[in-house]
Amino acid sequence: MVRRPSLAALLALVAAALTTAGCGGDDARGGSAAAPAPVQLALDFTPNAVHAPILAAVRTKSDERHGVRLTIRRPGAGPDALKLVAAGKLDLGVLDIHDLGIARTRGIDVVGVAALVQRPLAALVARAGIRRPRDLEGHTVGVSGLPSDPAFVRAIVEHDGGDFRRVHLVTIGFNAVSALLTGRVDAAPVFWNAEGVALRERGVATREFRVDDYGAPRYPEVVLVASRRALRSSRAKLRRTLLAIRDGVRAVRGDPGAAVRDVAGAAGSDDTRLIAAQLRAVEPIFSPDLRLHRAVLERWADFDARIGITRARPDVGRAFDFSLDPA
């Protein structure tokens, strides 16, 4: 379901990286008042509306006001973010919560420290003729090839009383928008805030079946993660960074036009109309205080294990650190 390259290869590399040098320690201020502590944060995907609070924290200098200087690493600029965060070479990373669960159950000691959004972004988007998920029996659903896609399709169809065995899955890679536009498939699992918005902007009539309307809890889809090593050595610096990003949420809501320009510039895109539409879609579910809610995460862990996204139930107490709450 998640729109990023497979984790299989990178997870195999993390164990070796864990023995290499980290980011360094933290003092009471991460340096002096005149020298904000450097923080490197890696995005999980091409900059998009979900990342707007992080970009706004830099534009408005919220980071410097909280005693840190935030550098944002974009995908493709270097080695994989998860590997570098796990090794302690980067301070923070943005990660889909399911990727965090997969990494944890494979022994990678990255820890969720904050939530960027407070609702799932996963949805099964279908052409308008499909009135409800069980109507997909006998129809074609495009999947990316990631193991999470069939798990999401099955969960949504079966929750609606459908027979998943009668759904025809075809692999389309990460081309859900074009596959739906051309009629190659009748539905595809996507992010409703990204591909779902893009389809509407292209004038495609669709129906959207969000996973939390079909049995999933309202878990935070996008989280910030750190290594346990960084939590021990740089706790104060990490908390100050979260305070800056929290201020970034307020900045986005106060000036959405500036936030659109932030995302467009970071992504190298001139399609500000689409970015604005995607920001309008996701802004209501931004987490104003970045808070992690343990009861919600326990339900998320049950869900991921039940539908087979993770091979074992994630241990919420080890997968998340609740002590950095910037509120």
Image (spheres, helix red, strand yellow):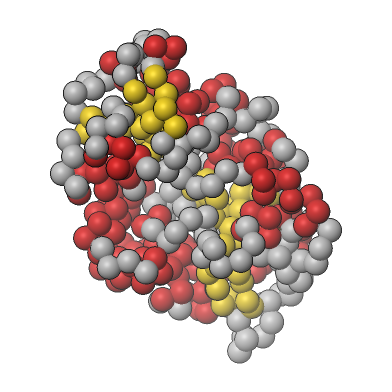
The residue nearer to you, when weighing 155 against 205, is 205
Tell me if I can see residue 230 in this picture: no
Name the quadrant containing residue 33: bottom right
Tell me if I can see residue 312 in this picture: yes
Name the quadrant containing residue 231: bottom right
The residue nearer to you, when weighing 72 against 300, is 72
In the picture as drawn, the residue positioned furthest to the right comes out as 19
Rendered view: 50 above or below 165: below
In the picture as drawn, the residue positioned furthest to the bottom comes out as 34
**Residue in view at x 51 percent, y 65 percent:** 74
The number of discs equals 0
* Residue 311: percent from left, percent from top: 66, 27
Instruction: Judge left or right: residue 5 versus residue 133.
Output: right
**Residue in view at x 81 percent, y 63 percent:** 20
**Residue in view at x 20 percent, y 49 percent:** 201
Instruction: Judge left or right: residue 318 versus residue 289.
Output: right
**Residue in view at x 22 percent, y 21 percent:** 131
* Residue 11: percent from left, percent from top: 69, 46
Instruction: Judge left or right: residue 272 versus residue 326.
Output: left
Rendered view: 131 above or below 326: above
* Residue 270: percent from left, percent from top: 27, 68
Rendered view: 294 above or below 237: above
* Residue 230: percent from left, percent from top: 72, 61
Instruction: Judge left or right: residue 23 versus residue 64.
Output: right
